[in-house]
Image (cartoon, helix red, strand yellow):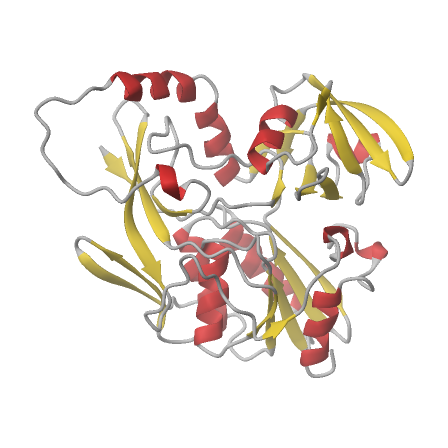
């Protein structure tokens, strides 16, 4: 039985459709490890060792059959930055989901879907008040199959029938904003994030007067990626801690310091979770950068995946994580240094469509105002 290390969030109200949440406690075929559970903490209790002479495995076997049918491939692909779908970013509320952006070159982009479009129906199903998980289940599907969306654009109702495709999603995008300020958004902490983030720094930092790291809507990801991002900004010390049955594991800053002194502001919101909270919280504790936005999601449980010989995967909650100062953000979230709300999700700057600008993004503009020359 093999183990590998990862970290993942899940309370995602603004997400890229195709990223699947943690599934109870047993996940089949997931290339996993340790990660932070966010979406279903009530279903994944902290599990210790105990002895049972008679264990009823019928429910486990039922869960295996359900999960094995489809979910494991989606989980594995999500951590590789790819999935099968149409390529839209959605924001969720009590009303209809709103498209906050599209993946460049995706079926959704080619079909003409735009930021600000409300998704009213998927097929014949009205989806007012739908959750991110439910929307993912409806809109995702096998490559080459079609999905029909009813869109409300202003007062006009429109119907789009889109063919699902395999989509490779960058987890990091960057641009220059303001007065030579490097803007970098991390959408999730996947297997390719460390490399993409390092490349964004090397390309964008020369001549930059400051930097904005955007972690809004970021559900989290691998521990290694979180450590690597923190280490780019902090030269020494601890990145974060995990507390478990074997004691305290203190993660230390790595050796790659691409931006140790650049003035930094970090954007966060209620959908910033797990690894995003670790990065934002660690940078705040190290006084490396101020947080701007709204209180983050706040959940500190840690999970571990044990990959079995047949490729199946045992998924357990085993630890809690803490910031370098020993504080937990569980059920509290991170409090920004400067609180700024965004009237609507579509007001956020879309770095994949920089020509649209960021005039309505109050949080980004507040961040720029805190930077020298921003």
> Up-down: is 92 above or below 247?
above
Q: Is residue 182 visible?
A: yes
Q: Residue 317: x, y in percent?
A: 30, 43
Picture residue at 70% right of the left edge, 38% below the top: 88
Specify whether residue 257 is in view: no
* Coordinates of residue 342 in the picture (x, y in percent): 71, 60
Q: Which residue is at 33% across, 30% downward? A: 26
Quadrant of the image occupied by residue 314: top left
- Quadrant of the image for the C terminus? bottom right
Q: Is residue 41 above or below residue 237?
A: above
Between residue 361 and residue 191, name the one nearer to us: 361
Give the image location of residue 328, x and y in percent. Answer: 37, 64
**Total marks in image:** 0
Of the 4 image quadrants, the one containing the N terminus is: top left
Q: Could you say which is closer to the camera, residue 96 or residue 360?
A: 96
Foreground pick, 243 / 190: 243
In the picture, measured across the screen, residue 2 lies left or right of residue 199, that is left
Displayed quadrant of residue 323:
bottom left
Q: Residue furthest bottom?
A: 372
Nearer to the camera, 32 or 293: 293
Q: Position of residue 131 (x, y in %)?
A: 59, 36
Q: Residue furthest right?
A: 156
């Amino acid at each position: 039985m093999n183990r590998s290390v990862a970290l993942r969030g899940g309370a995602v109200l603004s997400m890229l459709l195709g990223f699947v949440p943690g599934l109870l406690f047993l996940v089949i075929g997931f290339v996993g490890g340790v990660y932070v559970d966010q979406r279903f903490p009530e279903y994944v209790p902290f599990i210790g060792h105990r002895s049972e002479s008679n264990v009823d495995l019928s429910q486990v076997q039922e869960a295996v059959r359900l999960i094995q049918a489809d979910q494991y491939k989606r989980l594995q692909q999500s951590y590789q930055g790819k999935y099968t779908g149409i390529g839209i970013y959605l924001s969720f509320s009590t009303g209809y989901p709103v498209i906050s952006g599209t993946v460049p070159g995706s079926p959704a982009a080619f079909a003409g879907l735009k930021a600000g479009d409300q998704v009213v129906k998927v097929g014949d199903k009205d989806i007012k008040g739908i959750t991110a998980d439910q929307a993912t289940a409806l809109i995702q599907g096998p490559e080459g199959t079609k999905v029909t969306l009813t869109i409300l654009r202003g007062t006009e109702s429109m119907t789009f029938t889109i063919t699902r495709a395999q989509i490779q999603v960058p987890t990091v995008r960057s641009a220059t904003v303001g007065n030579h300020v490097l803007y970098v958004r991390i959408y999730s902490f996947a297997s390719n994030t460390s490399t993409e983030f390092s490349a964004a720094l090397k390309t964008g930092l020369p001549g930059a007067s400051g930097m904005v790291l955007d972690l809004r809507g970021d559900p989290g990801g691998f521990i290694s990626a979180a450590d690597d991002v923190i280490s780019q900004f902090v030269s020494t010390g601890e990145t974060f801690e995990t507390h478990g049955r074997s004691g305290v594991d203190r993660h230390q800053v790595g050796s790659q310091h691409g931006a140790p002194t650049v003035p930094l502001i970090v954007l966060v919101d209620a959908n910033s979770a797990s690894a995003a909270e670790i990065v934002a919280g660690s940078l705040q504790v190290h006084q490396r950068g101020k947080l701007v936005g709204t209180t983050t999601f706040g959940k500190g449980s840690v999970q571990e995946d044990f990959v079995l010989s047949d490729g199946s995967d045992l998924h357990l909650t085993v630890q809690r994580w803490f910031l370098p100062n020993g504080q937990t953000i569980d059920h509290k979230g991170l409090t920004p240094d400067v609180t700024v709300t965004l009237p609507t999700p579509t007001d956020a700057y879309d770095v994949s469509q920089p020509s649209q600008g960021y005039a309505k993004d109050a949080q980004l503009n507040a961040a720029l105002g805190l930077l020298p020359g921003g």
